[in-house]
Image: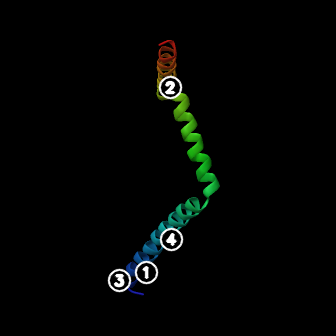
Amino acid sequence: MTAKSVRQTEELRAEINYTRAQLGETMQELAGRMDVPSRMRDVYRKATTRAKDSPAPWVLMAGAGAAVAAAVTLMVVRRRSE
């Protein structure tokens, strides 16, 4: 074997190893995407963590709901008293 053919062989082996590594990563990513129950658990876990870390929107929504309920109650009471 000449030096040129040895270098070409080594380059081909390096390219094959690189391609194998990429293929392995791609297969792992595809397998992860196909695991729907695991993905749903992750989405649920992230949502509950986000809700626990930042309860302000939930508090505001509950407060707004209570304000609307109070306003409706006042309107009904005023109309009945008229």
Could you tell me the amino acid type at mark 1? Thr
Could you tell me the amino acid type at mark 4? Arg
Asked if residue 10 is positioned above or below residue 58 in the image, the reply reads below
Mark 1 or mark 2: whose residue is earlier in sequence: 1
Name the secondary structure under disc 3.
Answer: helix
Extreme residue toward the bottom, this view: 1
The image quarter containing residue 36 is bottom right
Q: Residue at x 50, y 12 (%)?
A: 81
How far apart marks 3 and 2 lie (CA) works out to 78 Å
Could you tell me the amino acid type at mark 3? Lys
- Residue under label 3: 4
Between disc 4 and disc 2, the foreground one is 2
From the image, which quarter does the N terminus lie in?
bottom left
- Residue under label 4: 20
Mark 1 neighbour class, 10 Å CA radius: few under 14, some 14 to 19, many 20 or more: few
Asked if residue 14 is positioned above or below residue 41 in the image, the reply reads below
How far apart marks 4 and 3 lie (CA) works out to 24 Å
Mark 3 or mark 2: whose residue is earlier in sequence: 3
**Which numbered tag is attached to residue 69?**
none
Between disc 1 and disc 3, the foreground one is 1
Q: Residue at x 47, y 67 (%)?
A: 22
Q: Are marks 3 and 2 in contact (CB under 8 Å)?
A: no
- Residue under label 1: 9
Mark 1 or mark 4: whose residue is earlier in sequence: 1
Between disc 1 and disc 4, the foreground one is 4
Q: Is residue 67 left or right of residue 37?
A: left
Q: Are marks 1 and 2 in contact (CB under 8 Å)?
A: no
Number of labelled discs? 4
Q: Is residue 21 left or right of residue 8?
A: right
Q: Position of residue 41 (x, y in %)?
A: 62, 47
